[in-house]
Amino acid sequence: MKFSNFVLGILAVIIGVLLCVMQGEVLSYIITALGVILIVNGIMMIVKANLIGGLVACGVGVVVILGGWLFLSVCVIILGVALILMGVYQFIKNSAAAKHLKGAKAFFGFFLYPIIEILLGIAFLFMFGTLMDIFTIICGVLLILYGISLMLGKSKA
């Protein structure tokens, strides 16, 4: 087992626990860190004579730091509306195709997926905070498991 894998495993477990325990707070730190990384990358691009790319990266980094949660919220709203519209469209389209089928076969074959899609869209629109908490907990658990597998030498970084 490599020492670097062990250290990365410990870091993954620590970050995973933080994600599980602190949820939204950790996300705001991650958004800020992403913005800082973009700014540093942009400065490095400018130093290497890539002025336009560097300025774009710096600008995106500043926008991410200043409005990361706003953009995340807007993206989630757009995703929610898109899921609802796609679900309704598929429901209407599948209704015509399912006329010859009856019972459970028609329901599971043609209507279950659009119904789930519509419900997910509604959840994205009205339960944003809860979904973000669930998402961060899932990511935290996956990071903990990944960290453990790194420390045990069962995975490679």
Image (spheres, rainbow, N blue to C red):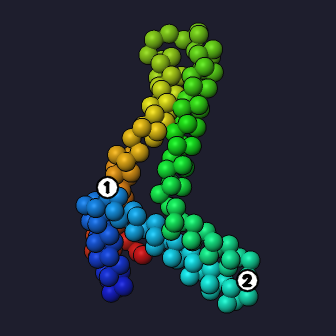
Height in image: 3 above or below 68?
A: below
Amino acid type indicated by mark 1: Ile
Height in image: 105 above or below 82?
A: above
Q: With 68 as the anchor, is 43 left or right in this view?
A: right
- Nearest the viewer among 4 and 64 is 64
Q: With 107 as the anchor, is 46 left or right in this view?
A: right
- Nearest the viewer among 34 and 115 is 34
Residue denoted by label 1: 137
Direction bottom: furthest residue: 47
Distance, label 1 to label 2, CA atoms, is 39 Å
How busy is the neighbourhood of tag 1: few (under 14 within 10 Å), some, or many (20 plus)? many
**Quarter of the figure that contains the N terminus:** bottom left
Amino acid type indicated by mark 2: Asn
**Quarter of the figure that contains the C terminus:** bottom left
- Nearest the viewer among 92 and 50 is 50
Q: Residue at x 33, y 87 (%)?
A: 3
Q: With 73 as the anchor, is 137 left or right in this view?
A: left
Q: Is residue 113 visible?
A: no
Residue denoted by label 2: 50
Q: Which element carries disc 2, helix, strand or loop? A: loop
Residue 70 pos. (x, y %): 51, 55
Residue 114 pos. (x, y %): 52, 28
Q: Residue at x 62, y 86 (%)?
A: 44
Q: Earlier in the sequence, mark 1 or mark 2?
A: 2
Q: Which element carries disc 1, helix, strand or loop? A: helix
